Image (spheres, rainbow, N blue to C red):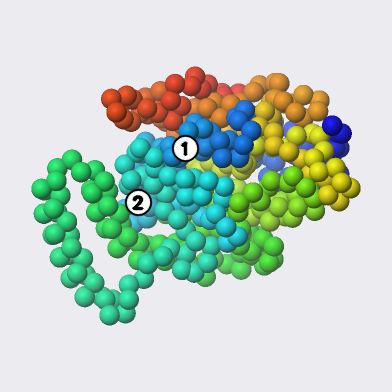
Amino acid sequence: SKILASPWKWRRYGEAGMELSELIPHMGSIAADITLIRSMRTGVNNHGQSIRAMNTGTTVAMQPSLGSWFSYGLGSATDSLPSYLALIDPGQLPVEGVANWNNGYLPSVFQGTVMRPTEPRILNLTPPKRLVGKPQQQLLRYLERLNQQHLTNKPGERDYQARINMYQLAARMQTSAVEAMDLSQETAATKKHYGMDDPVTNDFGARCLIARRLVERGVRFVQVFTQNQFWDHHGRIRTSLPAACKKVDKPSAALVSDLKRRGMLDETIVHWGGEMGRLPVIQNDTGANNVGRDHNTKGFSMWVAGGGFRGGATYGATDDFGHKAIENVVHHFDYHATLLHLFGLDPQRLTYLRNGREQSLLDGQDGRVVHEILKRG
């Protein structure tokens, strides 16, 4: 196979000289706040299985997602918003679809709540006009009595209790969620900072800004997705990769800098990345404008910021061809162990009893806490 050199220039940012592509200049501006991990590995070469590994800890389908585990382990910090929200792209659902925010075998109260990219961002949030005010309040009180009577006759029905809780939360969200999604409360300068003045970055910028507003209001876990295979550049990488980077570069950097400006970054972790990188060799060798790269899950990069991670740090390395991680390899289960550690959760003790067996996010994998990328003390 033919080796494909990078068509783009690289430059060093910050005091540590973090090397980043010219395609993500705004991320370069936050180099002092991020930890760049260049040695990630899942080792499973298909999108679905690798996404599951990064997002659920295993390649097995329909397991609890990270957001579900964190909601289960930490509980909720607000009673008026879900503890876990998934902000989807207007193009289409990501690979694996709704499984990305699935609660798996955890109680259904820990599943993610979908927030759509256009209005209405959350379906069925606004009551019909005939029920607004007292009629709806009376109806909900009556419904609550019926639900409690039924629950008394069905002790131990966790799914039923979860459904009651979710309906009660939905009623409270009629006010709280509408307020959280109302970007008219933000200044023009803030919206511009997130790229909402540019059609290319407007949508992703708005969702990043909403993510900040949700975290401010006590939401534990927020995922901001791009659409299905948006980064899967088997061909035309010279045009498709710059377009993908431009969509997310400015908004992603704005989220980190905005959290920092508001004094929230130390207690919030921002993760940027996906389930794989690309091979160093050419795929679709039918002309310079058509070439692409195939999947690579044996050595890829992602970055994290805030919440106890060191800023301005680069960790790990691949071989000279950028094929396999060979220095300070970070497996997906190592990353998960590190996340749980930062939130005060023991990776081996955060378990759920299922079919007589204690199961966990790591589920038997010996994940190590990567202390080298964490702040001291």
Image position of 345 (left or right of 136)? right
The residue located at (24%, 43%) in the rendering is: 158
Up-down relation of residue 163 to residue 339 (above or below): below
Pick the residue in front: 187 or 26: 26
Q: Earlier in the sequence, mark 1 or mark 2?
A: 1
Image position of 90 (left or right of 218)? right
Residue 87: percent from the left, percent from the top? 51, 55
* Mark 1, secondary structure of its residue: loop
The residue located at (36%, 44%) in the rendering is: 110
Amino acid type, callout 1: Ala
Say which residue label 2 marks: 78
Estimate how packed mark 1 is, as few (under 14), some (14 to 19) or many (20 or more) residues with alpha carbons within 10 Å. some
Query: On the rendered image, what quadrant is the N terminus found in?
Result: top right
* Mark 2, secondary structure of its residue: loop
Q: CA distance from mark 1 to mark 2?
A: 30 Å
Image quadrant assignment for residue 298:
top right
The residue located at (33%, 25%) in the rendering is: 358
Say which residue label 1 marks: 61
The residue located at (51%, 32%) in the rendering is: 59
